Image: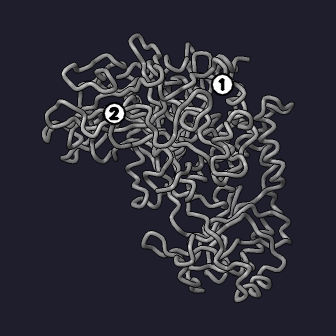
Amino acid sequence: MWPPPRTPCAAAETACTARDASHRRGFHEINPLQSASGTRRADRGSTQDTDRVTARVFLAGRDAEGLAAYARAVSDPSSASYGKYLSADRAQARFGATRAQISAVTHWLTGAGLKVTATDRRSLTVSGTASAAERAFATDLHNYRKGGHTYHAPARTASAPESLHGAVLTVTGLDNAPHMARHHAQLPPPSQIFRNSGPFSSYYGSKTNKDLPSAYGAKQPYAVKGYTGKQLRAAYGAGKRTGKGVTVAITDAYASPTIAADARRYADRNGDAGYTKGQLSQVLPKKYSHIKECDAAGWYGEETLDVEAVHAVAPEADIVYVGGASCMDDDLLDSLGRIVDGRLADIVSNSWGDIEANETPDVAAAYDQVFQMGAVEGIGFYFSSGDNGDEVARTGTKQVDTPANSAWVTAVGGTALAVGKGDTYLWETGWGTLRASLAADGDSWQDFPGAFTSGAGGGTSRTVAQPFYQSGVVPNALSKANGGAAMRTVPDIAAVADPNTGFLVGQTQSLPDGSLTYDEYRIGGTSLAAPVIAGVQALAQQARHGVPIGFANPGIYQRYGTAAYHDVTDHPLGAGRDLGVVRVDYVNGIDASEGTTTSLRSLGKDSSLHAVVGYDDVTGVGTPGRGYVDSYRR
């Protein structure tokens, strides 16, 4: 994904106006697609005619407007069409591209000198010279500098011939800057073993060192070793529901070679139900790409977390992992498309994304089309909201993450969760962490309360208008935070994410001598929150006797302000009563051979974002309460 700047060839520049007019006659703009520069100084001039270009042309299908309208109608509980989903074949027949459209688009592209190298239900992939791409899309390609590298991108919005009658939805790849998704988890690469140092609490507050300095007027407990499925199910009101009869899909890049063995071993060690034959399956690409750029091994732990978290919350739900060939948008879109094309699942958990500034309108349009097609089939998509709060500390700009910003997905925010003795839900705060180290003399917390380390992503989109379901719920102070019209606000719902109150995960990792070992450690991030919510939704769908929930947001907001939710705030014990936990960590991340560090982690301190009474931009409408699952009963 790449920032969408203004076209450098503005109408006021007479040197290029005449060329624009002749070059674009008989064409219409596809989706607002802008160059990768952001400033004129990044523009390095025209791309060489002979440079190679690979692009992907997405087809609008028979009725793009009708698709969006039907997706809304079947998802809205107040609509007469609510729940009247279509099969994958019927959805394709009603809204997919026709053979005539595919033929016409192919003729246009090949006629311009491009070669069609691949075709699927949604798109055609083409390759050729820069001059052929410019001719096909009635634009000029320029080179731009970004991060010390040179990429090519359109100098103005790409276009398609009017004669195609709107058959083209958008085109990606004319901007060839790498569009890489990040997985959202506080997680080490599995190529290097990671272990948590004790002491631990087995539940919140079970172990406190009275010799350590106080904070916020009290001695703070040690962080939990890592919550298990039993504790999470109790916290979020699972009751006796198990997710039986529901299928949850998980998308990430690549695939862990030890996932089946790790998942079985983890379930056996931590009291989860064992996997039945075929309950966990994988759909994988024929080959992988961008292995180095995407840090492929770093995604193994993401898949492990997602699978084990879903199973822990919904132990009888089927799980299908659909891996991407890389972390690039086109490959992740293909993974999502496989789920929709084959109606592989009811619920899709996605723990990856990027910042909104890196999202181009062409890519956003391609994602939304998949989400809308899924909605008409009764498939719901859940995306983690990010792990860097308002993103200012990381990017210098306050912004949300994507695809969580889409109006067609459920964005999942994060909390710090306290589960007490007897698996009793105590409270939650919004996830946001400050870190203060123990002073050398052991008598105080140095630089208390410390620096911001991480927190749940959230805030107000600059590109996506407010969807109908948020109207009347999201305060104007948030929806209009950027000025002007009300915009999409993230997240929609939340679950545990703080790695200091996180989930115990089991994974095969490498020891320093290169040998492999299975080990367990605590993990967090909205990468945890998304599969937890996916698991809860599987329980809720079971309560509906298996009838799909589909795109959940209209129903989620319909329940706003009811006992279905825990209304999470940063001060659950009252104004002025701040909370924290003590963490002890190995310096080398493996053992005590190089010593340990002790720190205080303050909870509920998410950058400029705040969890307050009512809807907020850290936890959305809140977290599932005891009555949430049963609120879906039919």
Instruction: Give the side of residue 389 with respect to residue 617, left or right.
Output: left
Residue 9 position in % (x across, y down): 67, 79
Residue 155 position in % (x across, y down): 64, 76
Work out whether 170 lies above or below 216.
below
Which of the two discs, 2 and 1, sits closer to the camera? 2
Please tell me how crowded label 2 is: few (under 14), some (14-19), or many (20+) other residues with Cα within 10 Å.
many
Q: Which mark is residue 601?
A: 2
Residue placed at 43% from the left, 25% from the top? 576
Alpha carbon distance from label 2 to label 1: 36 Å
Instruction: Give the side of residue 286 with respect to residue 268, left or right.
Output: right
> Which part of the image, by quadrant, shows the C terminus?
top right
Residue placed at 45% from the left, 73% from the top? 149
Residue placed at 22% from the left, 32% from the top? 444
Residue 87 position in % (x across, y down): 76, 39
Circle 1: residue type: Gln
Question: Which residue is nearer to you in this view: 432 or 294?
Answer: 432
Element at label 2 = strand
Q: Which mark is residue 541?
A: 1
Please tell me how crowded label 1 is: few (under 14), some (14-19), or many (20+) other residues with Cα within 10 Å.
many
Work out whether 388 lies above or below 551.
below
Q: Which mark is residue 333?
A: none
Work out whether 96 lies above or below 417.
below
